Image (cartoon, rainbow, N blue to C red):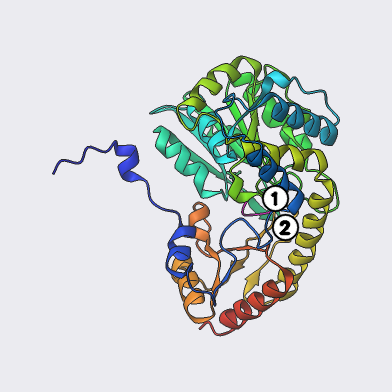
Amino acid sequence: MTNIMRPEIDAIETSGITKVALPYMQDPDVIPLWFGEGDISTPEFIRDAAKAALDRGETYYQNSRGRPDTTRSIKAYLDRIYDIDLNPQRITQPGSSMLAVTIAVQTALGRGDHCVLVTPNWPNIELSCQIAGADISKVRQQVKNGQWHLDIDDVERAIRPTTRLIYVNSPCNPSGWVMPLDQMQRLLQICRDRNIMLLSDEVYHRHVFGVDVAPSFMTLANDDDPVVVVNGMSKAWAMTGWRLGWMVAPTYMVEQMTVFGQAFNTGSPSFTQDGLIAALDNGEEVVEQLRTMYRDNRDIVADALGNHERVEFVYPDGGFYAFPRIRGMNDSLDFVLKLAQTEKVGVAPGYTFGPGNEDHLRIAFACSSDRLREAMKRVVRFIDAMD
Ligand SMILES: Cc1ncc(COP(=O)(O)O)c(C=O)c1O
């Protein structure tokens, strides 16, 4: 048999998160802290809005850019939280944030083009760039004075004549790093000067502690700047299964991106868009409640690991992940598989978030507090039992 797969597809691998989750997902005794979601389902008023749309018979094809009333809600939401007056012509709602990322990536990148990913990184961004056939460079955040920090000079040094895209995710999955506005300004200027797409993944924008919303390229980028900001419903409104996200792109790109989206799923299901509208128009309380819960959960994880002699723990400023370094651990996949097997807790192995992370774990702390407390007891017991 001749292998007829494109080399880029032949080479891709499932992430380390799936490698640990798949064998243990059906085990009811395992407390799952591996995926980027909690155990609270979408609030009732959002589900009701989608149910009502179904009952009205909202089952037809829609504008693949998103319905006009969906675009209106996204604009009103962004205007409100960032105090801007966004040109609605920049908004597309193709389906999930993941899909928006893939559309943005393939709009800028083809085989042989170069991109720079800020790491530790969410594994799917790498997958998306690999599928496009791009050459990938990684620039790692470093821990300085007990905090994650990105050196923009490192990003600048990684740029080549073939660089077409720089990806940054703040608040960051998995490190919890939040990019300050002055760094955003500098990175934007670099991308303007060199005509590089700046892909800013802001899906954790409301999961910052101490302020209402994280610094954003939404407040910096003009209509024609080479910036695409991706965001979506999954995290701030507990809507992971709905597959709803959007992007804000330069005006001249949006029509082509919309046509491109037609080659994927031709827009998101119409009745789910009623859920999006309900959440964006009336969901501030939900955002607030989830954020309070995640802040308390962050403290549960910090109390368990913060002073452990084997653990280097950086307090996350945003997101809902902890990314501790475990001294003496040198095979993160082996570690998390044994943790799932013996202590029945599922976490993600560090290696899957890019090089330099083999001695890290990612703990998603979005689940209810009682389960998290129990899970952390088991994680500590497992670390204590290490040689
Ligand atoms: C950094 C980051 N970007 C994008 C996504 C995708 O989100 P969605 O569920 O909206 O596709 C995730 C999901 O975990 C993520 O962690």
Q: Is residue 95 above or below residue 344?
A: above
Q: Is residue 176 magenta?
A: yes
Single out the residue that lies furthest toward the top: 252
Where's residue 128, x and y in %?
47, 39
382 lies left or right of 133:
right
Q: Could you tell me which secondary element the residue under label 2 belongs to?
A: loop
Where's residue 42, x and y in %?
69, 53
Report the predominant secondary structure element of the magenta stretch. loop
Q: Amino acid at mark 1?
A: Trp
Q: Residue at x 81, y 54 (%)?
A: 209
289 lies left or right of 261:
right
Viewer-side residue, 40 vs 203: 40
Q: Are marks 1 and 2 in contact (CB under 8 Å)?
A: yes
Viewer-side residue, 58 vs 344: 58
Q: Is residue 187 above or below residue 12?
A: above
Q: Residue at x 77, y 56 (%)?
A: 290
- The tally of labels here is 2
- For marks 1 and 2, the one nearer the N-term is 1
Q: Is residue 77 visible?
A: yes
Q: Is residue 180 visible?
A: no
Where's residue 341, x and y in %?
47, 77
* Mark 2 surroundings within 10 Å by alpha-carbon count, few (fewer than 14), some (14 through 19), many (20 or more): many
Q: Residue at x 59, y 23 (%)?
A: 63
Looking at the rendering, the stretch of residues picked out in magenta corresponds to 173-178
Q: Could you tell me which secondary element the residue under label 1 belongs to?
A: loop
Viewer-side residue, 17 vs 316: 17
| Disc marking residue 381 | none
Gap between marks 1 and 2, in whole Å?
A: 6 Å
Q: Is residue 109 above or below residue 146?
A: above
Q: Is residue 225 magenta?
A: no
Residue marked by disc 2: 316
| Disc marking residue 177 | 1
